[in-house]
Image: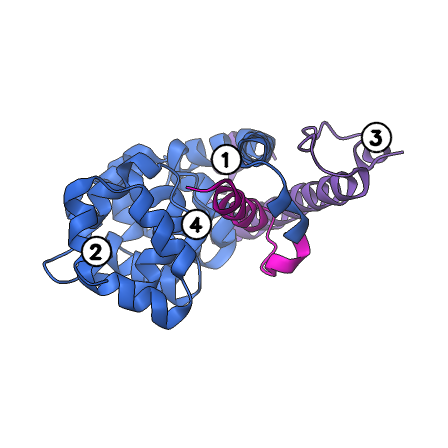
Amino acid sequence: MSVRQKRGLRLPPPPPSLAASDADHLSGLVAAALAEQRRQTAEAVERAIDHVPRLLRGPVRKVLGI
Amino acid sequence: MSAVLASRAEAAKLARLLGQREATTLAFLAAAPADELRAYREQVTDLLYDDGAAIARRAGEAARLLPPPVIAKIAREALGALLSARLGGQLQPETAVAVVKRLEVAYLAEVAAELDPRRAADVIAAMPPELVGDVAGAMARIGEHVAMGRFVMHLDDAALRACAEQLDDEDLLRVAFVAEEKERIDRFVAALRDGRAARLPAAARRAGLDDELADLLAHLGPEQRLRVEAGA
C-alpha cells in the first residue's frame, strides 16, 4: 500500500516516470510537509492571540473561528 | 536548456518546496523529465496553499481589525515565516507595506522564502525597490536562491536593479538557473550595470557554475548574450 493510500490524503500523483519506491518516498515527504504546515499553523494561531490587544481578542477570535 | 539541466533545476525547486535542504535526499528526481517535475511541483504548491487557505483568509480578515504595528509584532513574535507569508498574500498592499517596514530584513528574507509570488503579486509590486534589494541580499546570504528564483521575475525594472546590486555574481547565476520564467532572464541581465554582465563567465569558472552559465546564455537574446560573452 502506498503512502498516499495509507495516510488517506489526497496527495497529487507522483511523476509517472519515477520508480515505485521513489514515488512512495516523494509522497511521504509531501505528506510530512503538509503535516508540518498544519502543526506550525495551529501553534502560530494560538501564539498570535496572546499578542492581540485584550479588547480586540473577542472579535479576532470570532473572525478566526476559534 | 538541456533536458538534464532543466530537470536539475526543477528537482532543486521541488526539494526546496518540501523543505529538503540536502539535494542528495531527492537526487533521484533529476532523472525525471522537467515538465513532469514542474507539473507535480505546481500540484504540491496548490495542495499546501489550499490546505492553509481558509485560516490564512480568516487571518487576513482579522488583520483588518488591527493596526500595522500590531500586525508586525504578531508576525515577528507569533506567526513565524510560513504563516506570515500566507498572511502577507491576504493583506491590502498598502497595509502590507506598512507592516513590512516594521520588520527586520533578516526576518523578511525568511518570509519571502515562503511566499508564492503568484498569490502575492500586488504586495510584491507595492514594495519599495531598495527594500526588495535588501531582502534579496539577505535571502542570498541564507542560501535561498531557489526561493528567489520564484519571484525575481515578478519584479519591475527598478526592483530588479536593486536586487542585482545586492547579489554577487555567483548569486546571479544561481538565481537565474532556477528562475521561474526563463523568458524574462534577458531583462534580469539587462538590469546589470556596465561591466557586471561580463564578469559572470569568470564567476562561473571560479565557483564551478559552468552549467548555470550555459543555461543563462541559452536564454539570452543577442544583445545581452554579447554583454556576458564579452567576459568569456
User: Is the Cβ of the residue at disc 4 closer than 8 Å to that at disc 3?
Assistant: no
Q: Which quadrant holds residue B169?
A: bottom left
Are the residues flagged by discs 4 and 3 from a single subunit? no
Q: Which residue is mark 4?
A: B147
Q: Secondary structure at mark 4?
A: helix
Q: Nearer the viewer, mark 2 or mark 1?
A: 2
On the image, the x and y values in percent for residue B197 come to 19, 58
Q: Nearer the viewer, residue B174 or A41?
A: B174
Residue found at x 47% / y 40%:
B86
Q: Which residue is mark 1?
A: B56
The circle drawn on residue B229 is: 2
Please give the chain letter of the residue carrying mark 1.
B
Q: Secondary structure at mark 3?
A: helix
Q: Which residue type carries mark 3?
A: Gln
Marks 3 and 1, how far apart at CA: 28 Å
Are the residues flagged by discs 3 and 2 from a single subunit? no
Residue found at x 64% / y 53%:
B27
On the image, the x and y values in percent for residue B61 come to 43, 31
User: Is the Cβ of the residue at disc 2 closer than 8 Å to that at disc 4?
Assistant: no
**Is residue B181 shown above or below B206?**
above
- Density class for disc 1 (Cα within 10 Å; few <14, some 14-19, many ≥20) is many
Marks 2 and 1, how far apart at CA: 46 Å
Are the residues flagged by discs 4 and 1 from a single subunit? yes
Q: Which residue type carries mark 4?
A: Ala
The magenta span reads B1-26
Viewport quadrant of the C terminus of chain B: bottom left
